[in-house]
């Protein structure tokens, strides 16, 4: 659906009311967003329709992992999610999935050793060789890896987990971790994500910038003809 910006909205209102103040227009836009008449796509960018937030499914295992970590390390910053949720966006359903536990660097080793007491197998920052030889051949493994600072997260039922923006950026940046979701499958995931959910491009590109892949991801979005930037 076609996007429009704040200037477009202002021009529309002024075509009807030439003397309308910008503050009044801003107030109207705010309430249109609240009511769901407008959907905010980024800073000053909107489209008609309701905001549809991606809410990942968190199973009992994911909840158990998160609660264990927070009970032992209450000041840690943690993000937990299972890669099986990617099947919603792919053409081919993959049985190779794992639980990702992303933790701030100060806590990562403590969390790893704690999880090993209850879960098996658990891998700490596995390299490409370990991924191919062991992780991808294990039954529902856990991977503990560093959490990028200021990564876009959300809280679901008091569990810190992933957002759609983080998923899309991580697929591009962690190719060794997601080899089954590259090439045409990655483009399909981007297409499906944008078609089904509201993706905040400012948030996505800010995170992509922190990971040093902003321009590449902008090009990918342009290549698949998603008119969202």
Image (spheres, rainbow, N blue to C red):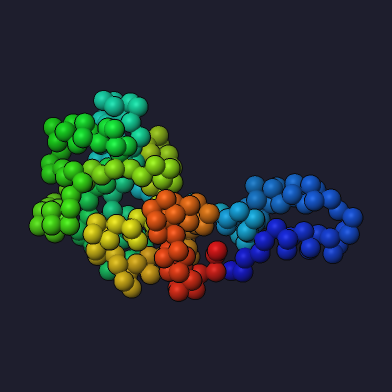
Residue at 45% from the left image edge and 74% from the top image edge: 223
Residue depicted at x 43% and y 42% = 150
Residue 205 position, x and y percent, is 48, 56
Q: Is residue 187 visible?
A: yes
How many badges with numbers are in the image?
0
Going by the image, does 14 lie left or right of 51? right
Residue 188 at x, y percent in the picture: 38, 69
69 w.r.t. 176: above or below: above
Considering every residue shown, the one lying at the far front of the view is 212
Residue 185 at x, y percent in the picture: 32, 69
Lateral position of residue 213 relative to residue 15, left or right = left
> Which of 106 and 75 lies nearest the eye of the viewer?
106
Residue 23 spot, x, y in % from top left: 79, 47
Q: Quadrant of residue 190?
A: bottom left
Above-or-below relation of 200 to 182: above
Q: Is residue 16 left or right of residue 121?
A: right
Quarter of the N terminus within the rendering: bottom right
Q: Is residue 52 in view from this perspective?
A: no
- Residue occupying the point 16% across, 45% down: 123
**Which of 40 and 217 lies nearest the eye of the viewer?**
217
* Quadrant location, the C terminus: bottom right
The structure residue drawn at horizontal position 69% and vertical position 48%, both measured from the top left corner, is 30
Asked where in the image residue 77 lies, by quadrant, the reply is top left
Q: Is residue 99 found left or right of 135 in the rendered image?
A: right
Single out the residue that lies furthest toward the right. 19
Using the image, determine if residue 185 lies above or below residue 201: below
């Amino acid at each position: 659906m076609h996007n429009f910006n704040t200037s477009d909205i202002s021009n529309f209102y002024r075509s009807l009311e030439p003397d309308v103040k910008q503050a009044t227009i801003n107030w109207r836009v705010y309430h249109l967003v609240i009511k769901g008449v407008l959907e905010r796509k980024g800073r000053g960018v909107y489209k008609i329709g309701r905001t549809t937030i991606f809410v990942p499914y968190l199973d009992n295992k994911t909840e158990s992992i998160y609660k264990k970590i927070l009970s032992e390390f209450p000041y840690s910053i943690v993000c937990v999610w299972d890669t099986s949720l990617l099947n919603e966006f792919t053409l081919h359903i993959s049985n190779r999935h794992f639980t990702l536990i992303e933790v701030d660097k100060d806590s990562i080793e403590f969390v790893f050793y704690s999880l090993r007491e209850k879960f098996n197998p658990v891998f700490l920052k596995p390299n490409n060789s370990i991924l191919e030889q062991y992780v991808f051949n294990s039954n529902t493994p856990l991977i503990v890896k560093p959490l990028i600072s200021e990564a876009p997260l959300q809280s679901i039922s008091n569990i810190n987990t992933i957002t759609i923006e983080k998923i899309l950026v991580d697929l591009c940046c962690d190719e060794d971790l997601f080899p089954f979701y590259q090439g045409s499958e990655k483009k399909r995931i981007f297409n499906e994500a944008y078609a089904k959910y509201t993706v905040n491009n400012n948030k996505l590109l800010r995170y992509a910038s922190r990971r040093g892949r902003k321009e590449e991801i902008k090009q990918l979005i342009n290549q698949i003809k998603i008119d969202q930037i």
